[in-house]
Amino acid sequence: MNKIYIRFISSVYLKYFFIIFAALELFYVGIDVLTNLKDLPTSANLQLLYACLLALSAASYTLPLSLIFALIVSSINLIRSNELVSFYALGVSRHAFIAPPFFIAFFITAIFIGLNFTPFAYAQTYQRDLIKSGGISQSTSSDVFLKFDGRFIYIKSLNQAKKSMQNVRIFELDGINLKSFLTSNEAMFKNNKWQLKDPIITMLPENMQLGSTSFSVKKEQSLEALSGFSPKSIEQASQAQSAMSGADALEFMFTFKDEEVSLEGIRASFYMLVFTPLYAPLLVFIFYCHMPIIGRFLNLAMASFVMVVATFVVWGVIFILARFALNGILNPEIALLSPVALLLIYSIYLWRRLA
């Protein structure tokens, strides 16, 4: 009996999920393509690539909504056909009945969160590059000025794809006084360190007085410096609003945690990638708990309409709070973790009430 109802509920839920997900993806891609039709690349291959990247970037919006809408549609249909109450009459508990859809929704959400730690998270960036330049950007930055490990660093040109930078200047200070500075025309990132080619190190005297020791200049063939200062961290620091994956966000936070750099925007991006998608399986469980057993107890059309509206309200509130957190208006923990925590607390309350 257990295997029968698990297979039945899972198949019904997955069927509606794939239908709704495909419909939302096609609608999103179609509207965007029609809107940007004049700006699309002339090459058919690039146009197809743009559509694929657009579908991947749209998943952050359509996937959670599809998981929730699939539960609403499948539950309403089971109630109307009296299949839901029949399972209850056969001894299937409400806890057991919601388990397959909830764990399916949680598993799909976990896969999506895992993908956010891969280059999948940069799909929207690649898509925008196709519109702006007609190709995938080579991830280059110019005129970067940063502080790292107590030093000020100027980089004329950074190529994140090749892990190289040109015309590097590293200034080391003793308090407010310049202690030394290093120049190098080229550097490569290897073994988590920058290999500076033909660096020139200029050491300044501690006492700037007439007749005292002058500055000294030393030339080296190569020099290792800036351990742990990865090209991706440099690029993210130079582009405040650029997208990033979960792994890159963690690396950025560990790299700049002691550099007196504001990390609120990075923390907000990380929470959006890791914790915010969890609202979908939580709403799946909450909506199920508020579903009637049979259609006589409630107007099913009105109930489905209210749940759809509630879904958009929750999604809209989380989206607005995310914008506020990214712009530094609200604390990321309050703006992004609190809504998910509240949904989790309410879900636990409903679970205990069902028990």
Image: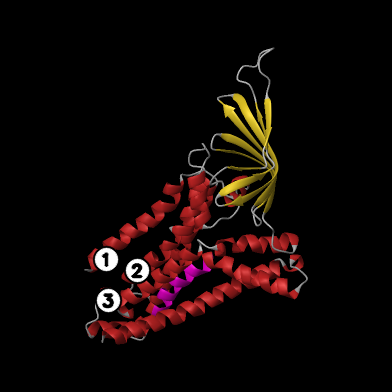
Tell me the CA gap for discs 1 and 3: 12 Å
The residue tagged 3 is 96
Q: Quadrant of the C terminus?
A: bottom left
- Residue 110, picture quadrant: bottom left
Residue 292 vs residue 145, the one in the foreground: 145
| Residue 215 at x, y percent in the picture | 68, 23
Q: Hey, what amino acid is under mark 3?
A: Ala
Task: Give the magenta range.
Answer: 61-74
Q: From the viewer's perspective, is 181 left or right of 275?
A: right
Q: Hey, what amino acid is under mark 1?
A: Trp
Q: From the viewer's perspective, is 325 left or right of 5?
A: right
| Residue 57 at x, y percent in the picture | 58, 65
Q: Residue at x 39, y 52 (%)?
A: 338
| Residue 31 at x, y percent in the picture | 65, 70
- The circle drawn on residue 285 is 2
Residue 319 in view (yes/no): no
Q: Residue at x 74, y 67 (%)?
A: 40
Query: Looking at the image, is 340 positioned above or below residue 211?
Result: below
The residue tagged 1 is 351
Tell me the CA gap for discs 3 and 2: 12 Å
Q: Hey, what amino acid is under mark 2?
A: Phe
